[in-house]
Amino acid sequence: TTNHPSFPRINGVDEATATLMVCAVARELRNGQVVAFGLNADSMLSAAMLAQQLHAPDLQIRHGLRAERGMVFGAAAWTDQRKDDSWRQVEYLETHDGILRTANPDSPMRFCDVFFVGGMQIDLEGSTNLIGLKGSDGQLSVRGPGSIGTTSIGTLASNVILFSPEHSPRRFVETVDFVSVPGWKRRSSVGLEGGPNLCVTSKAVMDFKNERMRLRSVHPGLTVEDIVESTGFPLLLPDNVQTTPPPSKAEQHALSYLANRASNSPAIRP
């Protein structure tokens, strides 16, 4: 376990499960990739930094228009400090195409290789919904946070990793009510390459086969039947479903090191 209460932290999930989720994601990241995050994805930042410590030293973390090999625990756009000008790069109003050129002038369409995103709903092909939920009349009845920039970034990334603290039929539905980031079939229908390759929840790890979600592993203490009952559509089930490996000693040590660094970071603005 770590000695810093917010590293890693996932709302609604106990520390042991949060750590397991972070480790499961970190193991999938590769050296040299550029990763980016949706809002409220602190845990995925933890995963990227863990991967840097263990096996991907040249993995780059993109925040705003900056991509850095290591995340700097100093003044940035989301803090109450203004000791440098980095916030100007992040918060300056810019057009969509301008952002892509600024972020990666050599290849504007490569904003990132991996994009992390969650959703109010996630469906069997990996589409996500951050817009809201429909009522019985088919109209919007519950408003979500909105897609904001996730649609643009999610379509540019060839590899999308989904994460969800909640694993229930309410969250995992056969078809999302609204589309924020498209899944496999929706992407291929408009000529977009790639798609979601992984989905990590508080109960299991899923991947995708033939454009459908497939159960890869269940977290310790749970069964395949538990996951099937918690999912609102039929999951593809391999012959041998593994148990998600617990955090290794190396992973625990690296998280402890990062937690100590995080304890000296500036306070996050509410």
Image (cartoon, rainbow, N blue to C red):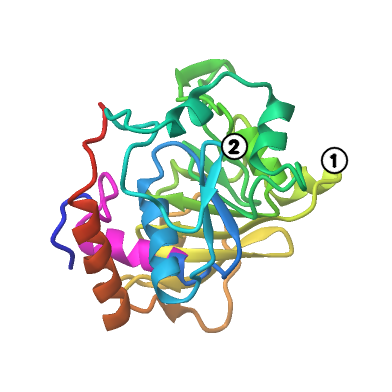
Q: Position of residue 246 (x, y in %)?
A: 31, 77
Q: Quadrant of the N terminus?
A: bottom left
Tell me what residue is drawn at x 16 percent, y 52 percent.
5
Mark 2 lies on a secondary structure that is loop
| Residue 112: numbered disc | none
Tell me what residue is drawn at x 18 percent, y 64 percent.
2
Q: Position of residue 134 (x, y in %)?
A: 53, 23
- Is residue 14 shown in magenta? yes
Q: Is residue 60 above or below residue 183?
A: below
The kind of residue on which mark 2 rests is Val
Q: Quadrant of the C terminus?
A: top left
**Other residues around mark 2 within 10 Å, as few (<14) / some (14–19) / many (≥20):** many
**Nearer the N terminus, badge 2 or badge 1?**
2
Q: Position of residue 80 (x, y in %)?
A: 27, 28
- Is residue 118 shown in magenta? no
Q: Nearer the viewer, residue 169 or 107?
A: 107
Q: How many marks?
A: 2
Tell me what residue is drawn at x 32 percent, y 32 percent.
83
Q: Quadrant of residue 261?
A: bottom left
Q: Nearer the viewer, residue 1 or 181?
A: 1
Left or right for 111, reference 25: right
Q: Which residue is mark 2?
A: 176
Residue reaching furthest to the left: 3
Mark 1 lies on a secondary structure that is loop
Q: Is residue 173 something one can see in this rendering?
A: no
Q: Which residue is mark 1?
A: 190
Q: Is residue 238 above or below residue 84?
A: below
Q: Position of residue 232 (x, y in %)?
A: 50, 49
Q: Quadrant of residue 220?
A: bottom left
The magenta-colored residue range is 7-25
Left or right for 31, reference 97: left
Looking at the image, is mark 2 or mark 1 nearer the viewer?
A: 1
